[in-house]
Amino acid sequence: MEYPKIKLCINTSEDDLVNELYKPGFMWASRLDRGVGYFTSGWLTCNLEGLSDFASRGGTMRLITSPILSNADLDAIIAANESDGSVFKKLEEALVQNVEALQNEMSKDILNTFSWLLYDGIIELKFAIPCKSLSNGDFHDKFGIFYRDDEALSFSGSINDSAHGFQNYEGIKVFSTWAGTKEYVYYDINRFNRLWDSKDPNLKIYSIPHAIKNRIFKLRSADRPYSFAHKAKNKWEHQDIAVSRFMEKEHGILAMATGTGKTITAMKIMDQLFEERKIKRVVITMFGTDLLDQWAKQLREHYLDKQVYYHYESKKMMNTFIMHPDDSLLLISREAEDLKKLLNLFDRSPGNYRDDTLFIFDEVHGVGSNSFVQALSGRLSQYKYRLGLSATPEREYDDIGNDFIREEIGEIIFEFSLKDAIRKGILCEFSYVPLQYVLSAEEREKKRRIIAAFSARKKNGEIVNDTDMFTQLSLVNKTAINKIEEFEKLISKRRELLNKSIIFVQTMEYGEILQEVLIKYTDRYHTYYGDDEKVNLEKFANGEINCLVTCKKISEGIDISCVSNIFLFASDRSRLVTTQRIGRALRLDKNNPDKVANIIDFILNDGDKENDSDTDHERSEWLTELSKIRRIEDEE
């Protein structure tokens, strides 16, 4: 790789910052992270040439800066409540003045360029507002990191991104991963990511509100002021196709792999339906407080002109929602009786609820449960707009549940699979490592006793559910002691597989046995078995823990895209759980763009059909085929 020729120390008196730092950086890099106290159109004007080349090659820039706010605005935002969305309304009100300032300050050409850069996602903008111990100060930092492949170059100094900043006497120091100063680069990378992910307790970080984005988007011309060849190869175009398909069908299921933007796609559908005045309200339902909270945060930030109500955990706002149903959204836990009550309230209320309400069922496979089938058959299908979301919408071994989902919500109208996502470069490629194991004599005998007991009950005329038998047999496999021996054989040779790894086990007791081996090879591991250990999950996400042993479904609200290795000591017969678990390693990592994950699985090597080894082999064949998928590079 040819590295940019940038001096280690630069100052405005002796050097040309645009031509000696920014331009070569933009011409070399594929990404830029920038934290700066003050950002204006003057900086855009000076760097237009480098930015145009950067944009044409698909470069992206993450920018954290201070909004221009009065003291009254700052006080109001810091005091506002994020949980009820009032802080986002305050921020939007204050940023309207920022948009007006942009219009007054920027020339028509530069304003047009900025609007297009924001619209195309080339610039992603967040605002930093000091709070707590820094509440009397400003976000005043100035540093940045250029990235290309595995290399990076960081710079820091006193200059703001403004034309006036270039006229001051300012100095900048430059560090790179190839010049013996990589520890400084990594410090800047980690610091920026900590800010971007809102992990600094003394800063409030806000994405640019949807309403403000739309104001800026309206300022752009009909044509881009720069070439943007890769736009035609947009890897997110599947979202727009899914939106079009739903608008055509008006109900149905989007089967989209984890990490491909199901929530964003659903919000695009909501946007279009609201904009075309086809709906007046949205009801969004799913199971799990973490997922509901994640939706709540995104809705509050996105829909500043709508009222968001909640009906889950201690929040009980269904009746308030019914009193003010227009231009509103309700997040409700997936409890059949709660939804039945809501539908009954709709039936008794004046208005055309069945034609102007959008129902969204996230993780739609859960809707096929017995409680839904019994309580809501024939009720949901009466509503015109019904949207189901899931990576794996089919319920395995449950024809009744699947029929209910198809009849009440609809057929799959769009599919974007794991294979599609890997080919598009939305999820990363992975290597599959199947480890064969055998059952101990005691375990084989235990399975024979389970089968014999169920056979005896059938002969006695009892009604026996074969699923219960398979569950008990599967538990023996999931806790097979010889898996630990095969695990140690592997990591003794490939200790790097423990780096940034999650180990999924079935029980705490099995995890304790595993830890006796694990401690020989690393002390940077911890367990995550219950909500009281959630701090360990957060430490893992922050890099303080390198390996996590868990028997829980990892919360979708925690960003752990750095995960590279998954160990599947426990795998369900259903593909749903396996898909969710391997998906934790398939997320792209902005700090490791060439990441290739590893999925380590355990396959029962037992010719005895009574011992139920077919499930492992089916999973192994499926994951083997997936691991052969390669990203298809865009052609010029």
Image (cartoon, rainbow, N blue to C red):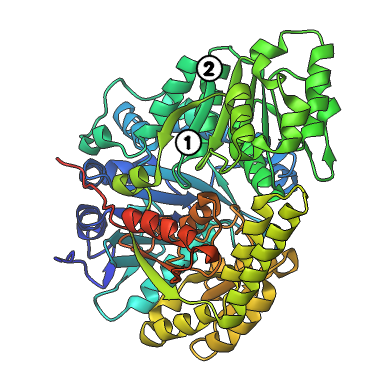
Residue 217 x/y as whole percent: 42, 27
Q: From this viewpoint, which residue is outermost toward the top? A: 351
Name which quarter of the figure residue 157 lies in. bottom left
Query: How far across and down, in percent of the image, does residue 98 sit?
Result: 52, 35
Where does residue 59 sit, x and y in percent of width and height? Answer: 28, 48
Q: Which mark is residue 308?
A: none
Cα distance between the residues tagged 1 and 2? 16 Å
- Residue 391 as seen in the image, left or right of residue 470: left
Q: Residue at x 54, y 31 (%)?
A: 267
Quadrant placement of the C terminus: top left
What amino acid type is highlighted by mark number 1? Answer: Ala
Is 223 on the left-hand or right-hand side of 272?
left
Question: Can you tell which quarter of the image residue 327 is in?
Answer: top right
Residue hosting label 2:
250
Residue toward you, 181 or 129: 181
Point out the image quarter for the N terminus.
Answer: bottom left
* Residue at the disc numbered 1: 255
- The x, y position of residue 276, in whole percent, is 53, 12
Against 196, residue 50 (above or below) is: above
The one of 160 and 421 positioned closer to us in this rendering: 421
Graded by Cα atoms within 10 Å as few (under 14), some (14 to 19) or many (20 or more), the crowding at tag 2 reads some
For residue 158, say whether it is visible.
yes
- Name the residue rendered at 76%, 30% in the picture: 374
Q: Residue at x 64, y 40 (%)?
A: 366
188 to the left or right of 397: left
User: Is the residue 181 above or below the residue 414 in the image?
Assistant: below
